[in-house]
Image (cartoon, helix red, strand yellow):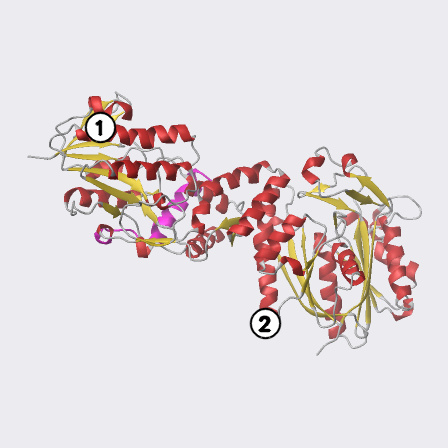
Amino acid sequence: MYSIGIRAHEARLGERFVSLQDLVSEPARFQEFPGAWVTENIQSLLLQTATDVLEENQLSGNEIDCLFWVSAIPENHLRQPQTGQRSFLSNFCYSGSWLQSELGLRRAAVIGVAQQGCAGFFSAIRLAHNLIAAEPDVNHVLLVGGDALTSGTSREVLFNIVSDAACAVIVSRERCRYRFVAGHQIAKGSFWDVCSKPGEIAASYFPSAKTVVQMLQEKLGDDGIDLVISSGIRRSSWEILLNLWAIPVDRCVFPRTSFGHTIQADSFLILKQAEADGLIQPGMRILLFTFGFGSTWSALVLEAI
Amino acid sequence: MKKRLFLTGATGNLGPAIRSAVTNFDTTVLVRDPSCHFDGVTTVSGDLSQVSKIGPRDSDLILHAAADTRFAAPSSELWRTNVEGVREIIVFAQSCPHLERLVYLSTTCVWGDARGRVAEIACTTRPGFHNEYERTKWEAERLLMESQLPVQIVRIPIVIGNETDGSIQRNGAIHLSLKWIARGLLSVIPAHPDARLDLVSVDFVGRGLAEILWQSDPKRSVIHLSLGDHAPPLKEVLQFLMRWIGKKEEPNPPAIVDLDTYRLFKTLVSQTGDALFTKIYQTADVFLSSLLYPKVFNTSVAESVRRLGWRELCRKVFEYQLKHEY
């Protein structure tokens, strides 16, 4: 049996809190969200989070074989050139390469994961798992992902409030805390034009979420789900999802304090909370689910070791 | 000599089919518009509240098909047409010395939230209702059953379109629901896993009424003019619709959910205040929620009435709706 999985994970919200009253015109519609966490510099937050996860696990930069840079927002895949001047070549000033340099990951290959919306990190975990499984020389993959909305952008997205956050995960061949059991993804390219089909996308959210987890459960056979890690979206949405998946609501970990939806980091912010609360027991099968504009429905099952 | 028949509801959704069912009678039709005329029948203009004054008292048969079938109409309007209208018909019928039979076109919806197999009998115990339309039709049946008149109640299920081109005079809740599904905007359908969709054509109702008026045993006081055991499961109709939509674009089938999940969903829609989904689920409330209570209607006369297969009928209706409504 493969033991490839998640060795370590870290997630951080933006440094500054903005109250709901200062974010939206109709706060009454978003009562369960106290506000949003905002950062002025997402790349700095990502660097900090990645540094933390490496240091806490006593892994040196030289031990990382591959770096995945994950972001939903296209601009976040690029850095401003140090010259400050835009040119054709500035299109190649990649954020992932900058991070590799900052962290000293000299042996690492660098790969960007994009066009997955909020499901990018889940795809990166699957890809990292499969890379390690396929290539005997690859032992550690560092995944770093996060997004921040630019100043002035509405933080009300699909009936939720969006916070900024960063997330870093090490997927390894050994010494893992969570074994990767299975993953499944449904992509609906017909929803590529997010601007013109918001109603259709919202309507498709629950049926597709039901299907993606059903298909994952088929892969798992009779083994059930012991714990569900929710996300930062509305709790009532999660209660519907749990009903659709026929999973009791008491098996789901909800955020103690709602931080809103962070594009990449929700699941790992809440997984951290579940660990701190002693909810994770060896052998538990843990379901993670997310949706990303574009549109992608993605679910993972991890087994606590 | 032809029997004399007094007919209401000849201009509604089922008008053409009902008129074709009464061609062998000496028929007088109630019409609201004085300029309205049909070949081979006499018209009398007025509304339901005037029937006892203007209806022909030499009638041998009455076919009362006029109704307000809008599920979401104001209660007072539904009550006026569907209950007070029947009260007036009863007064009129009591004044007809030769009356052999009063045939009342009702709906299988009178069974509300009852479940399981439904016999062709009076619905004497008041069920829970999903909308005011159901309540008023049940009340009308109760008045008729208590009237001591020779009443025959003919209950029909959802009438979805005609067999020629799938069209219908006025779209109902089913058509609105199909539109939301076809546009990929219906996220969930509250329904029991065993729910069936008893869908009939306008023509089927016409053929059935013709048989009932001429050949059926008048002693049978309640008839279900429905598909009964032939009604397709909701899941099959949805799959058929999705395959059909899938020829043109990627379908987005709704999830079939139980009542608890549906309530959670409505709470979410209410929390978000989204205008589109609020509108969509107002429709779902008055119509689709009935699918939580699966029923199979026993049928007798309907078994001998020719019917188009549901797939063929649905295909025509979907094609018509896509071309003209969606």
Residue B209 percent location from the top left of the image = 22, 42
Q: How many circles with numbers are drawn on the protein?
A: 2
What are the residue bounds of the magenta stretch? B303-326
Q: Quadrant of residue A52?
A: bottom right
Residue A97 belongs to magenta span? no
Instruction: Write the residue at 26% across / 50% down.
Output: B120
Badge 2 is on which residue? A221
Q: Is residue B204 above or below residue B67?
A: below
Labelled disc at residue A261: none
Is A97 positioned to the left or the right of B294 in the image? right
Seen from the viewer's position, the closer of residues B118 and B253 is B118
Is B166 positioned to the left or the right of A156 in the image? left
Q: Is residue A3 above or below residue B295?
A: below
Seen from the viewer's position, the closer of residues B253 and A96 is B253
Quadrant the N terminus of chain B occupies: top left
Indicate the amino acid at tag 1.
Answer: Val
Badge 1 is on which residue? B91
Residue A219 percent location from the top left of the image = 60, 70
Instruction: Write the residue at 78% across / 56% down.
Output: A269
